[in-house]
Amino acid sequence: MDPAVLRDDMVDSLEHESKGCVRSTALSVAMRAVPRHEFVDDERAAYADRAFEHFGTRVLAPSTVGRLLEALDPDADDSVLVVGAGVGYTAAVVAEIVGEQNVQAIDITRRLVYEARDNLRRAGYEGVLVDCRDGANGFPEYAPYDRILLEAAAVRPPRALVDQLAPDGTLVMPLGAHDQALAVVDRDGAAERLGSCAFDPMLVEGEQADTVERNRTRREDREFAERDAQRRKGWELDWIDWDADAPTR
């Protein structure tokens, strides 16, 4: 089937009152324009409203992308930072609204950065800049940003991201650990909660999927797996002082 028809069907379903996660004309037009099959291997699965795992990251369902971007509410020519580039689809939709040259995206996993760049190039958005960075530090070289989207959960807004907002800018992020809410955070750190959500925690250096580690015995692998299943990860670790200055990379 023609991918354009599949895209229209996908967005029609997201606009339907049963879901209602795409409401604005700008977002509707953008999601109808971006060829999502360039970011997902299976063309038919690309337009199904479901999430899946890829290279250690969760590729968001289209309905989740719609909800995030409705909350982000970018205007034409806004400067936007996407933290957690993943496969690059969200950044492409944002680029349709604000222009490629106004979108920067970062991801902590280098393998995903390379894939996002390739996907964006094939889809026609090679003007979007994707770099390998620790999301906790943001991308200060291109700050300030009118909008920042964080596609991972944190127990509180990362200070570096808030500091990189323009005076009237907003940060959209899943806020909390186990009980999360989608939140819109302003330059003063005040958060408006828009409803519950469930996202993976933001990773910190050493937790990305392509981290190199020494060879371990089978016993160690089993023990590490059991320990990992019980421990918190990334920004779930609320005892860490995330506001401390992080080393630059």
Image: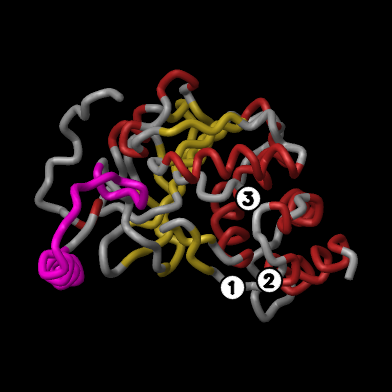
Alpha carbon of mark 2 to alpha carbon of mark 1: how far? 8 Å
Q: Quadrant of the N terminus?
A: bottom right
224 is within the stretch colored magenta: yes
Q: Quadrant of the C terminus?
A: top left
Q: Secondary structure at mark 3?
A: helix
Where are the magenta residues, as a range?
206-231
Is 232 positioned to the left or the right of 153 in the image? left
- Of circles 3 and 2, which is in front? 2
Q: Earlier in the sequence, mark 2 or mark 1?
A: 2
Q: Amino acid at mark 2?
A: Ala
**Residue 50 tag number:** 1
Residue at the disc numbered 2: 45
Between 189 and 240, the one lying in front of the other is: 240
The residue at the point 12 percent across, 46 percent down is: 240
Q: Earlier in the sequence, mark 1 or mark 3?
A: 1
230 is within the stretch colored magenta: yes
Residue at the disc numbered 3: 89
Is 214 positioned to the left or the right of 143 in the image? left
Q: Secondary structure at mark 2?
A: helix
Q: Secondary structure at mark 1?
A: loop
Residue 191 in percent (x, y) is at 36, 49
Please tell me how crowded label 1 is: few (under 14), some (14-19), or many (20+) other residues with Cα within 10 Å: few
Alpha carbon of mark 1 to alpha carbon of mark 3: how far? 14 Å
Is 236 positioned to the left or the right of 249 in the image? left
Discs 2, 1 touching: Cβ within 8 Å:
yes
**Residue 25 tag number:** none
Above or below 7: residue 115: above
Q: Amino acid at mark 1?
A: Arg
Residue 224 in percent (x, y) is at 14, 65
